Image (cartoon, rainbow, N blue to C red):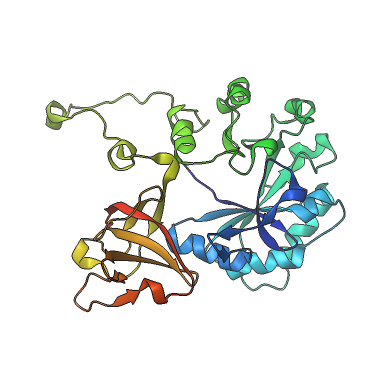
Amino acid sequence: MLIIPAIDLVLNKVVKANAGKRTQYKNLKIGQTDYSSPKKFIKLLLTNFKFKTIYIADLDSISKPGRTNWPFLKRIIYNFPDIFFWIDSGLENLTQIRLFNEFINKSQEKKKRFKIVVGTESFKVKEDIKKLPENCIVSLDFNGTEKGWFKYLDYNKELILMFIKNVGGHGIDWKKLKHLEKFFSTKKCFIAGGVKDLDDIRDISNKDYKDPFSHKKLKHSGFPSPANDYIENPINMNDLLIKRASSTFLMRFRGSEMIFSGIRNNAILIIDRSLKPSSGNIVVASINGEFLCRKILLGSKKVLVTDCSNNKLLDIDKIINFELLGVVTSSINTY
C-alpha cells in the first residue's frame, strides 16, 4: 500500500482540515508548536518517515478561480528535490495545465518531476479529461457534482477518489466506496479524505481493493518448498505490536543516544499517546519544538536521560516548552 501525506495550504500556511469547511481551517499546530510553515512541516515529516511522495492542495487557488500561487508552489517543489510532489492548484483547463508545467520547469537546469492533480471541482471542460498530459491524475471530487463525471473517466488509468466532506479525519465513506468498486477493477485508485487513524489504513488494506496491474490470485508453480511444513498463519505486525491503534503513531529515530535500550539509528518507534509514563519508561517528548526519545525517571526530580555510554540528563522542570507525546511500546530496528 502506498501512503501519501496530504498538505492543505491557505495563505501559504499549512492548515488542519475540517470536513471540507475551508473557511474554518486553522493553522496547523502539533501540541503547542506551530507547524504552519510548509518547509518546517515537510522537514518534520521527512525526519520521521521515509515518504517519497507528498500531495499539496493550494486551497486559495482551488477556492478562488483565477488566482494563482505558482511561485510559492515552485519554491516548495525545488526545496525538496528528492520528493515527488502531487500538486492541486485548481487548474481549470488544458491551457492552464500547459502553462503550469512550463512555469515549474522554467529557468531550471535540472527539470523536476511532479504530478498535477486535476480536480473535477475545478476543471471546466469534461471532454478534455482524455487529453490530459501524462503527468496528470484526475481527482474525482465528491462535492455533489461527481455523477456528471463518471462517463468521462474511461481514459484514465489512475484516479483519486476525494471525499471532500470527510477530510480532516472524519472517517471513510465506506458506503460510497462500495458503490465505486467497478473503478477498482479497471483503475489504480487512491482513497483520499476521511482517513483518521491506523485502523482506517488497516481497514482499507483488508478490503483488498484490487488495482488493474495486480493479479487477483497468483498461482504457485515449480517444486514445493520443504519449509511449507513449518509455515504458520501469516504474521500481522499490527496485531503483535499495536494494542490501541487510535492512540498509536510511528516515528523514525535518528542517533545513538538510546543504543543500550536496543534502539538503533533509523529504528521505527511505536508510540502510544494514551499511556501514562512510569519511571524507567522510554518516551517521546517535544522540547522547544524538537522531538526527543529518552528514558524518563520520576523521582524527587523528573528527568529525561539518554541510554548510551555518555549519558546526559535533562531536568524536565527547567524546560520551558515541554510536551510529552507518548510512551514507546516497541521499536523496530532496520538493517
> Residue 112 location in percent, x, y?
62, 63
The N terminus appears in which quarter of the rendering? Answer: top left
Work out whether 177 lies above or below 252: above
Q: Camera-side residue: 194 or 96?
A: 194
Please tell me which residue is depicted at 49% across the width and 35% down the height of the picture.
200
Whether residue 216 is visible, yes or no, is yes
Q: Camera-side residue: 302 or 136?
A: 302
Q: Camera-side residue: 137 or 225?
A: 137
Please tell me which residue is depicted at 58% across the width and 41% down the height of the picture.
169
Whether residue 97 is visible, yes or no, is no
Residue ranking furthest to the front: 300
> Residue 294 location in percent, x, y?
31, 66
Residue ranking furthest to the right: 66
> Residue 54 location in percent, x, y?
57, 54
Callout count: 0
Please tell me which residue is depicted at 87% across the width and 54% down the height of the picture.
66
| Image position of 110 (left or right of 325) | right
**Residue 84: which quarter of the image?**
bottom right
> Residue 219 location in percent, x, y?
32, 23
**Residue 325: which quarter of the image?**
bottom left
Work out whether 216 lies above or below 132: above
Work out whether 110 lies above or below 210: below
**Residue 13: which quarter of the image?**
bottom right
Please tell me which residue is depicted at 75% across the width and 30% down the height of the picture.
146
